Image (cartoon, grey):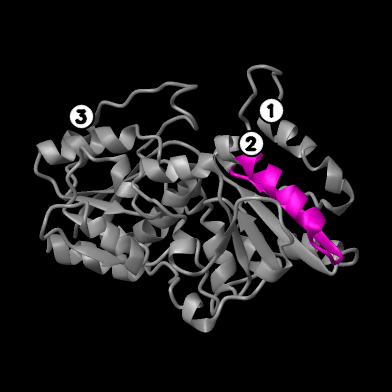
Amino acid sequence: MLKLLFVSKDFGGTKTLVPIGLTAKAAGHEITVVCEGKGAPLWIRAGVEPYFMGSSDFETVPFSLNVPALFDEVKPDAAILEIPYSINLTKSIGLEANIRSIPVVIAQDYWSSLCGLPEVNPSLVLTIDEYAKKIAESQVNIGTPVRIIGNHAVPNLRDYQEKPEVLNILSEARKKFDKLFVYVGGHRDCVEPELKILIPSLEFTPGNWGLIPRYHPKCCNLFDKASGKKMPEIWDNLFEPIASRIVRCNLETSDDLAILCDACFSGISSSMSSALVSGKPAVSIRTPESMALLREVNLEEIPWVALGASRAIEQAQDLSPLLVPPTEEIRKKFRPLDASFAVRAIEELLL
């Protein structure tokens, strides 16, 4: 039996670690969970009581954890980390593991995210696809294994179950619209520039379509300092030119909408992978703001564009020519998460 310490923060990273943790537990290993951020409640919903759970935003609501004492008590055989853009517990626990010569396993949910934690030396990297593997291999020490385990945002269509609440929203909306699109916004700095390209583009696009706007969970409670308003409220005002086409819904994630709608628009959201593997078009919105974020992790192109899976727009245009379903060859580039393979890779490293 192995003692595995799981550390997570962001929504996507936690959606990667939870299935791995549950699979490891089912295989007879002991798991301990330390978490914070928006993804933390996912562990509780999965039936795992965290050893420690910090606040949803450590910068707004600070907290502390005695990391050396954590290691002394848990005595983990390995630390399994996800790499969020905003490092906190992940970094301190990864560094402590390195000091103690305890193997660190990094599970990626995005391309090139290793750049977010350059101080920590991993013994194993679990990544999402061939493109991510090549990038990861260029960032770690020679000989460090990099294994492809798939992407949490890619549904396994054989096992995928449509959620009734999503179907209810879409079936009602389809009474009014022939086509339903979803926009998935990510980083707060990117949403407004993306919408200023997308909204006039939709105005140029013929047909009886409706749009479901979705923002990242981390953005939903952010405030604009100048006005005191919540950022989603400010962004919602941008939809005024197409107000009659907007469909509102209050779902936790955007992946199901990306799977079931007729097309997905976004800057750099993983939900585009959900759409593509489901055979739906995904159109990238390239802005200076989103490209600046990608360059922070040494990416020079939007990943889906680099993979040939998506076309990018940089200015307002008719979207009709871009709404082409991906080929089977493109869809095969996106693999669903295989938690069993991830656990086997960890076992091979440690046993």
Question: Are dots 1 and 2 in contact, CB under 8 Å?
Answer: yes
Q: Reading the chain from its start, which is encountered first: label 1 or label 3?
A: 3
Amino acid type, residue under disc 1 in the picture: Lys
Which residue is more in the foreground, 104 or 241? 241
Point out which mark residue 230 bears: 1
Which residue is more in the foreground, 18 or 11? 11
SS of the residue under disc 3: helix
Q: CA distance from mark 3 to mark 2?
A: 35 Å
Q: Is residue 238 left or right of residue 37?
A: right
Q: Reading the chain from its start, which is encountered first: label 1 or label 2?
A: 2
Q: Is residue 347 left or right of residue 177?
A: left
Q: Is residue 346 visible?
A: yes
Residue 95: x %, y % from top left: 19, 36
Residue 220: x %, y % from top left: 63, 36
Residue 177: x %, y % from top left: 86, 65
Amino acid type, residue under disc 2 in the picture: Cys
227 is higher (above) or lower (below) than 173: above
Q: Which residue bears the numbered disc 2?
A: 220
> From which residue to which does the magenta span run?
191-216
